[in-house]
Image (cartoon, rainbow, N blue to C red):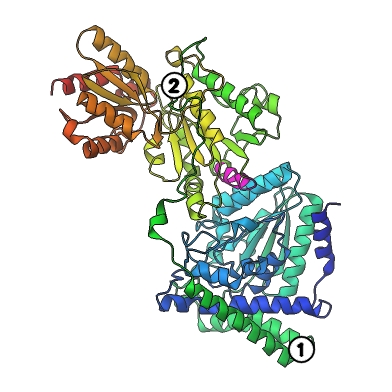
Amino acid sequence: MSKEKNRACELSEAKYSIKKTDKEILAKWFKLMLVGRAIDDRAPNYLKQAIGWSYHAPYAGHDGIQLAIGQVFDRENDHLFPYYRDMLTTLSAGLTAEELILNGISKASDVAGGGRHMSNHFAKPEWNVHNTSSCTGNHTLHAVGVARALKKYKVSGVAISSQGESSVSEGYVYEAINGASNEKLPVIFVFQDNGYGISVPKADQTANRKVANNFTGFKNLKIFHCNGKDVFDSMNTMAEAKAYVAENEHPVIVQANCVRIHSHSNSDRHDLYRDDYELNYVHEYDPLAKYRRLLLRYDRFTEEEIVALENEAKEIVKAAHKAGMNAPNPDPASIHNFVIPEPYVSEKYPDGLHQHEGEPKKLIEALNETLKAEFRNNPDTYIWGQDVANKEKGGIFNVTKGLQQEFGKERVFNAPIAEDFIMGTANGMSRFNDKLRIVVEGAEFADYFWPAMEQLLDTSHDYWRTNGQFSPNITVRLASGGYIGGGLYHSQNIEGTLTTFPGIRVVYPTYADDAAGLLRTSIRSRGTTLFLEPKALYNSSKVATPIPDDFEVPFGKAKVRREGTDLSVITYGNTTPMCEELAVKLQNDGVASLEVLDLRSLSPLDTDAILATVKKTGKALVVHEDKVFGGFGGEVTALINEMAFEYLDGPVKRVGSTFTPVGFNRILEAAILPDIQRIEEAIIELLNY
C-alpha cells in the first residue's frame, strides 16, 4: 500500500471524538479555530479604517468542515482549491495568521499573489494551495484537471475542491463531477452548505434539500454527509472520504451542513432577508462555542487552560496584525510584470523565415506532422478535445489523425462535448508540473468556443494573478473562419474578442510553414496561446509550402509576402492569398505596386513591421475576414493613425465582413464575406485618393 493510502487509512481509522482524541491535537485544533475566528471577526475593521479587506466573506459557522479539510490536506501530494470563504481551511492547511492578513489587506508580500487578487482569496501555490478565481465553482474543473495528472503520473494524492452549495448550480460544476466520475479521478468535492447563495435561499437553487443528492445517479461517485458545524463529525467524514478515494480510486462528494452566522460578505445585510428567530438560531449553533463547551464538559481542559490558549491566539493575531501593518504595499510599477511568460525563442529562425526548398506540404499536413514531432520531442505533451481520437479519425478535419495510434490513449484522448470542461481541465492539469504542455482542440469550430470563455478568461490572468507563480502552459487549437458554406456556428471569426484579453497570445497563420513554425513555438512556450487555423485552407494548394523539419516562427513577427511601393495591404488568415493574388494582378496590369504584409501573430502584434510598411508606401488598407465593425482591423488602424499619421497620403481603409452573421446559403455567404472584387475596389479607391 502506498504512503498516501497508509496515511489516509490511518486518518480514517482514527475515529476522532472528544473523549479519545489526544489532548495535544485538541489544543492544536482549538488554537487554529481561535486564531481563524479572531481574524474573521476583525477583518471588517480593516475596511472601516480604510486599510483594506474591502471584500470579506465570513466563515463563522463553517468551522468544523474547514478545520477538517485543512487537517487532511497533505501539501506534498494533495492539491487544495479553496473558495473565498475558506479562511480557516487555509489556516488549518498551514498558512499563517500573518499570511491571511497580508492577503486581506493586499500587501506585496501576500503569498497568494502579492495583492493582485481580491481579498479573501487565500492561497499558497508553492504548497499546492491554489489561487482560485472569484467565479463561483469554476475551480472544480481545475481540481479535475490536476487529478487527471495525479492519476496519469501515479501520484498518491487527491485534489480537494471546496465550495459553497450554491456554486453547484453552475453548469461547469456538473461537467466537472461528470468528468471526474467518468475518468475515475481522485477528487473530493466539498460542498459547504449554509443554506444561502448571498441572499438567495437554497430552495430557489435546487429541488433537493441536500444539493449533493442531485448527483446520486452518477456512477463511480460516492456521497458523504456530515455536520460541518461539528469538528469530530467533519474530521471523521473527511478522513473517511480521503481513505475511500485512495482505496477505490474514484471521486467523492462531501456535503457538510453549516450555518452562516454573519452576512454573506461586508457588502451584504442579512437582516434584510433573515428574521430574528433565524439570526438567534445560527448564533446558538456557533461551532467554536460548542467546541469550547465540549472541552470543558468532558474535562479535557480546565477553564484556566482554555483561557491560556485563548490568550495565545490573541497574541498570534496581534503579532500578525503588526507584521501586516509594516509590510510594503505593491509597487505601481510592477503592474506589467507577469502578464504573460517569456516565449520560447528560436535561435535558428529568429525572424520566422527560411529558404523554400523541398516538396510543398498542405496546411493540414503541417499541423499534423508538427503535432507528432512535438509529442516525440516532449513526452509530457498531451492533447484532448471533441472527436480527436476515434480510430482512424482525428477531429472533424482529421488534423490529429494518427496521434492516438502512435502516442496512446494516455496522451491523446477524447473529451466530452463540453468546451469549458476541455479548457478548465487543461488549466487544472497544467498546474501539476510546469514541464507539461497541454494542447486542446478547444471546440470543433471556433465559434463553438463561447462556452469556454469563462475558463479562458480565468486562465488569461492566472500568471498575473499569482505574481508569476503559476503559468497555464496551454495551446488552444481552433478551426476558424468561413468560405466553407458552414453558416452559423461553423463560419464565424472570434479573434476580435480573443485579442482583448491580456495574458494570452493569439496567432493566425495562413501558410503551411507558418502554421508549423507557430505551432511548434506555441507548444514549446510557457503560457497560453490561441492558435487559430483558417480551415478553408486546410487542403488548399495555394498555401502549401516546403517546411523545414525544425521550423519555428516567433510570436509577434509579421512577414512581408510581397514587396511594393504604392500601397500597403495588411492582412492575415483566409484573405492573405486573395491579397497576394491581387498584388500580382495589379502589378502585371501596370496599375500599382502593392506591399502585402501577413501579420501571422495578432497578440503580440508586430508594430514595427506595420509602421515600416506604412512609412514606405504612405497608404494602408487593412483586410481581414472578420467583421469590419468591432474587428481586429480597427486596432491596426488606430495604431497606424496614432503612430504613423504624418506618413499617410490617405485615410486608412478597412475591408472585412458585413455586420451580420455569416449565412449558410452560399449566395448569402458570398455577399457577407470579403472577396477579391471587394478588396480590389477598396485598393483602387485608396490609390485614387
Task: Assign a secondary structure to mark 1.
Answer: helix
Label 2 crowding class (10 Å Cα cut-off): few <14, some 14-19, many 20+? some
Would residue 416 be visible to someone looking at this image?
no
Viewer-nearest of labels 1 and 2? 2
Left or right, residue 469 beside residue 118: right
Which residue is depicted at the point 61% across and 35% down? 384
Residue behind mark 1: 297
Q: CA distance from mark 1 to mark 2?
A: 79 Å
Instruction: List x then y, in percent, for residue 272.
Output: 44, 77
Give x and y (percent) for residue 563: 30, 17
Residue 450 on image: x %, y %:
46, 41
Q: Which residues are magenta?
A: 423-433
- In the image, what residue type sits under mark 1? Arg
Question: Which numbered disc, 1 or 2, marks the residue that appears first in the sequence?
Answer: 1
Q: Identify the mark at residue 353; answer none if there is no mark.
A: 2
- Asked if residue 427 lies in the magenta stretch, the reply is yes
